[in-house]
């Protein structure tokens, strides 16, 4: 199994306000940039601990700007070229459709029936005009199956939850309740998943 060093993008203004971003391209805020650099430092320590050269790893990011900016700051912390990474659309955040930009209370006001159904089945029920976690799990699983080497991935909270389920490390309920930190590194390997902060 290839080792994955997984980093969620740094904070944005919408994260801070509790607004769901999905496919919206919201930039990092000042804290988010600080978190990205911190994650790069943690990654540098992990790579050194593992007796690796950072340049020997593959680097891939979600196409969304907040993930790409995080990746470029991580690469800077590793003293690697900022453009030295690939983009993979399968790592994009779960689409929240017409709920993008809304907070949880606003989602409930927008469509109370779908909101209630999604609370009962967060994995199977999609936001209006959005996508379900089940479909995200399928595309993230395809991404994982395509990996050939140990990889640094910078993406999103939703895609990490889907990866946990795709790899059999969590049930959908467990994954949906797991907080995904910013400014930290998650390592997926044969032993499971570990968080480093």
Image (cartoon, rainbow, N blue to C red):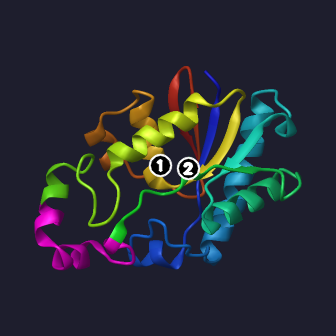
Q: Which residue is mark 1?
A: 159
26 to 151, vertically: above or below: below
Pick the residue in front: 37 or 120. 120
The quarter of the displayed image where residue 52 is located: top right
Pick the residue in front: 123 or 178. 123
Magenta highlight on residue 177: no
Query: What residue span does the magenta drawing correspond to?
Result: 98-116
**Residue 70 point in image, percent of width and height:** 68, 61
**Residue 152 point in image, percent of width and height:** 69, 42
Asked if residue 194 shows in the view, the reply is: no
Circles 2 and 1: CB distance less than 8 Å?
Answer: yes
Q: Is residue 95 left or right of residue 26?
A: left
Q: Which residue is mark 2?
A: 91
101 to 174, vertically: above or below: below
Judged by its main secondary structure, the magenta piece is helix
The quadrant of the image that shows the N terminus is top right
Residue in the image at 67% along x and 68% along y: 34
137 to 36, vertically: above or below: above
Pick the residue in front: 42 or 122. 122
Q: Is residue 144 left or right of residue 74?
A: left
Residue in the image at 53% along x and 21% along y: 191
The quarter of the displayed image where residue 102 is located: bottom left
Asked if residue 23 shows in the view, the reply is: yes
Query: Crowding near pointer 1: few (<14 within 10 Å), some, many (20+)?
Result: many
Magenta highlight on residue 106: yes
For label 2, the SS is helix
Q: Is residue 181 left or right of residue 3?
A: left
Residue in the image at 83% along x and 39% along y: 54
């Amino acid at each position: 199994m290839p080792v994955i060093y997984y980093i969620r993008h740094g904070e944005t203004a919408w994260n801070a306000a509790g607004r769901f971003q999905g496919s919206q391209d919201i930039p990092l805020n000042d804290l988010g940039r600080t978190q990205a650099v911190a994650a790069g430092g943690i990654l540098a320590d992990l790579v050194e601990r593992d007796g690796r050269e950072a340049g020997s790893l593959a680097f891939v990011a979600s196409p969304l700007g907040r993930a790409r900016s995080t990746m470029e700051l991580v690469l800077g912390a590793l003293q690697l070229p900022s453009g030295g990474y690939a983009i993979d659309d399968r790592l994009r955040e779960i689409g929240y459709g017409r709920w993008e930009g809304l907070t949880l209370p606003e989602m409930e006001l927008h469509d109370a029936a779908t909101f209630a159904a999604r609370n009962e089945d967060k994995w199977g029920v999609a936001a209006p005009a959005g996508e379900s976690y089940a479909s995200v799990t399928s595309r993230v699983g395809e991404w994982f199956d395509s990996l050939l080497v140990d990889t640094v991935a910078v993406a999103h909270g939703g895609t990490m939850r889907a990866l946990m389920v795709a790899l059999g490390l969590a049930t959908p309920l467990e994954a949906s309740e797991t907080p995904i930190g910013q400014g930290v590194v998650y390592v997926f390997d044969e032993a499971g998943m570990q968080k480093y902060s």
